[in-house]
Image: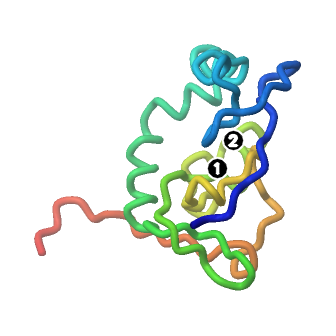
């Protein structure tokens, strides 16, 4: 049997009710909350958010996750063993838009290891994460 966690408060500003198990929100705010509203607005109006839905990002993201399927975060000297699901920018695209699809500027992480910060340029390869693998596919070559 796993350890019990203390209940937390709903993440919706000014709510304060206990959050629903497995969620950051109370039952009232699970489906409708300011975070979801802000994220939806950003996806429609924010130029950086829009880039995540346009080429070349989807193809780049798939290539990175295919070549780095295990979370690259180092925790207490050891690489996390969880499957990578997210591609994280070391330098936020808001700060360095020129590095948006640069393999050396991204690493693949699991949801648990993904920071809430927009970018982590202070992370060091070999200390905070393992080096990103990336090989350009050679198109038109037969095995």
> In the rendered image, is residue 46 in sight?
no
Please say if the residues under marks 2 and 1 sit with CB atoms less than 8 Å apart: yes
- The front one of 141 and 59 is 59
> N-terminal of the two: label 2 or label 1?
2
Of all residues, the one furthest to the left in this rendering is 142
Residue 44 against residue 58 in the figure, above or below: above
Quadrant of residue 67 within the rendered picture: bottom left
Residue 94 against residue 128 in the figure, above or below: above
Label ID, residue 80: none
| Residue 37 x, y percent position in the rendering | 66, 16
- The front one of 90 and 30 is 30
Of all residues, the one furthest to the right in this rendering is 14
> In the rendered image, is residue 30 in sight?
yes
Q: Residue at x 38, y 46 (%)?
A: 59
| Residue 139 x, y percent position in the rendering | 23, 59
| Residue 46 x, y percent position in the rendering | 66, 20
| Residue 129 x, y percent position in the rendering | 67, 73
Q: Which residue is mark 1?
A: 99
Residue 127 against residue 90 in the figure, above or below: below
Q: Residue at x 78, y 66 (%)?
A: 123
Q: Which residue is mark 2?
A: 93
Mark 2 is surrounded, within 10 Å at the Cα level, by few (under 14), some (14 to 19) or many (20 or more) other residues, namely some
Q: CA distance from mark 2 to mark 1?
A: 7 Å
- The front one of 84 and 42 is 84
Under circle 1, the secondary element is helix
Quadrant of residue 8 within the rendered picture: top right
Q: Residue at x 77, y 56 (%)?
A: 120
Residue 135 against residue 118 in the figure, above or below: below
């Amino acid at each position: 049997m796993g350890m019990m966690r203390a209940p937390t408060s709903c993440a919706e500003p000014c709510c304060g009710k206990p959050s629903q198990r497995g969620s950051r929100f109370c039952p009232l705010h699970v489906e409708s909350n300011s975070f979801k509203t802000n994220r939806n607005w950003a996806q429609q109006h924010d130029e950086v958010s829009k880039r995540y839905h346009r080429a070349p990002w989807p193809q780049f993201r798939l290539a990175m996750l295919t070549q780095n399927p295990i979370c690259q975060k180092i925790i207490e000297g050891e690489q996390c063993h969880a499957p990578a699901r997210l591609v994280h920018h070391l330098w936020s695209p808001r700060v360095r838009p020129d590095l948006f699809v640069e393999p050396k500027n991204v690493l693949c992480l699991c949801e648990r290891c993904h920071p809430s910060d927009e970018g982590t340029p202070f992370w060091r390869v070999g200390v905070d994460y393992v080096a990103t693998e990336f090989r350009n596919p050679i198109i038109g070559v037969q095995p």
